[in-house]
Amino acid sequence: MAAALETLVRQDYPNLQIIISDNASTDGTLAICEEFARGDPRIRIIRKQVNEGAVANFRTVLDAAEGEFFMWAAADDYWYPHFISRLLPALRADSAAGVAMCAVDRRLPDGAPFDLIRFIGDMNPNGMGHLRLLGKILSGAKYNLFIYGLFRKPLLQRAMRHFPVVLGGDRQFIAQMALACRFAYVDEILLTRTHQPKNFDAYMETMAKRGTLRRQMISFAGTILGSSVIPWWRKACLPVALMQYFMLSIPQKQFKRLNMIKIIARKFFISPRSLVMAIGLFGVSAVIGGFLAYLNVISSEFAVGTLSAAWLLVAAVLLNRGWAIRAQKSIERKLSGNDQEINRTLRELRYLSDTLLHPDLAVARTKSNQLSDHAVQRIEKHRKVVEFVRNLEDSRIREVYVQELFPGIEKESVPIGVINELTGHANKTDMLYVSAVAKHIGAKKMFEFGTYMGRTTFHLAHNNPDGQVFTLNLPPERDPRYAPYMGVLFKGREEEKRITQIHSDSREFDTAPYRQQFDFVFVDGDHSYDLVKNDTQKAFELIKQGGVIMWHDYAPKSDGLVRFFKEFTQDRPLFRIRSTCLLVYIDGVDVMNHKLGNLPHSLELEYREENPYLVESIYHS
Ligand SMILES: C[S@@+](CC[C@H](N)C(=O)[O-])C[C@H]1O[C@@H](n2cnc3c(N)ncnc32)[C@H](O)[C@@H]1O
């Protein structure tokens, strides 16, 4: 309680009133609150003689509040100092929004992370229509957390006339709000909420009890129909909403009994929930159609005709979906060899990336029942990422931030003279890292395997004004693909005087005249297994004592290269610079035991620390 209050009184929003309703507590809670109130005129305490329950308590504080905006606060939650000052502008910016909420970091009672709730992608409620929002709420998404958001008070007071006093009443209340107003969302973690597993267990237990679902349904219908904040025409969605609510709340135990439904649903590749929904909708429309025909509003032929046509359409969609998924499965099988492998890969993908190929997603974009080329490419790309990560784990490669390995490197300025777009290369940052490292170690003599347009060559020379760069590439006639572009980025520039172009196949290149002369070697030639092996061996011959070697393209796309380093690093571990596809060797440094430098303050690192769930992106895949 004290910790929660502490974070409330520290809100950076100036005009605040804090009302505490003590629900006849018998522990030391009241004393804590009084202690806070003594030094703070913004705090007011309302003491109740009898415990009237949570909802009455919710009302008490709302009725006592004076401001234009209002939020409820639970005693075991913690608010970031700018919770209110961030949410308020978001709420004000959208006059149709009645409540604003942020991302929520949920913790277990001992402070360990439980999960992180963000409403992003197609869950983002900003600008979402009322019915879609309601659909999402009733699909089980955690929008009920909006109850701890910032509300417009007049609307909230009117809505509070119907706060359902049943299990899951918060979801019903938020469903009511969804039909009454828009929701605003700020994608920033501003609230830490304590998740109580025992409450959840109790919830599931009550849910499984007889009569709970019935009471919930009645309460939900009453809330929607009786609400004075929902326009009457929107209430027409009640039959569908009730059905969705039913599907959401049906206890898992009872679901088991619906085996028949499951079997049929599987045939159509849809979820049992969707099938029950479809049957239910059919029933409702049949009843309405029959009733209208009975009243002679429409003819019975018309009712039967339209119903049949609608259902033929639904059946066609379902069948098409089934075919499409079958086609996808067969392609997946071809790609990965066997089912077990597919499942393992998909499971890993789920972990690795939120852009994973959800089966439905691929199916959605199928042409004439074939999986689109795009989807096939994505499966292939993800498979490569998984393979890459497996290889990385099997290699002796230590992942570090560049600042840990080269303390102070962030202070280097590395002017970029040539923009990346010219070269067609996918990432600029790697080149910056390479230039910065060469500059940071004060490299005087540098060697590069693979010139291509001379992008890195130019920057190495440009950023080390008294440095010399030797760059090796196949003679133009041996690589007609790249020949017209060879070294064009440094040709005719002042830096060219300090650049020596060597034309040779690196396999035939004799290192004898250059041995142990270079402070810095950059290996970026051909990425096949054999050539990386050849270039690496030569790089070690070229490097002088204390020198640095860097390799490019340690990434999922370079299978041969990754395979080579899996072997190579068993005896000779290397560093990998995080968020790049660069590997590093520093002569004389014991990779596994090297004491890393401290990281300088950075917003990104701070964010990473606060977000244990952030999965590092696999760069350059
Ligand atoms: C990835 S590009 C180099 C990119 C360049 N380092 C940069 O940062 O812009 C690879 C280059 O290696 C060259 N190359 C490929 N095989 C080679 C070999 N066996 N010997 C020497 N150069 C080779 C290609 O001609 C190509 O220009």
Image: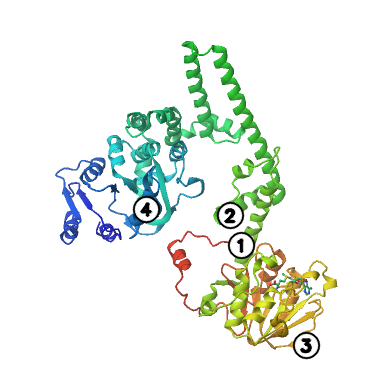
- Tell us which disc is closer to us: 4 or 2: 4
Q: Position of residue 392 (x, y in %)?
A: 62, 66
Q: Is residue 500 left or right of residue 24?
A: right
- Identify the element where label 4 is drawn: helix
The residue singled out by tag 3 in the image is 512
Q: Is mark 4 within 8 Å of ligand 1?
A: no
- Tell us which disc is closer to us: 4 or 1: 4
1 and 2 marks in contact (CB < 8 Å): yes
Chain-order first, disc 4 or disc 2: 4
Q: Is mark 1 within 8 Å of ligand 1?
A: no
- Identify the element where label 2 is drawn: helix
- Quadrant observed for ligand 1 in the rendered image: bottom right
Chain-order first, disc 1 or disc 2: 2
Chain-order first, disc 2 or disc 3: 2
Q: Amino acid at mark 3?
A: Ala
* Residue 498 makes an appearance in the image: yes
Crowd tier of the residue under label 4, counting other residues whose Cα lies within 10 Å: few below 14, some 14–19, many 20 or above: few
Up-down relation of residue 71 to residue 317 (above or below): below
Q: Position of residue 607 (x, y in %)?
A: 45, 64
Chain-order first, disc 3 or disc 1: 1
Q: Amino acid at mark 1?
A: Val
Q: Which mark is residue 389?
A: 1
The residue singled out by tag 2 in the image is 348
The residue positioned farthest toward the left in the image shown: 49
The residue singled out by tag 4 in the image is 89
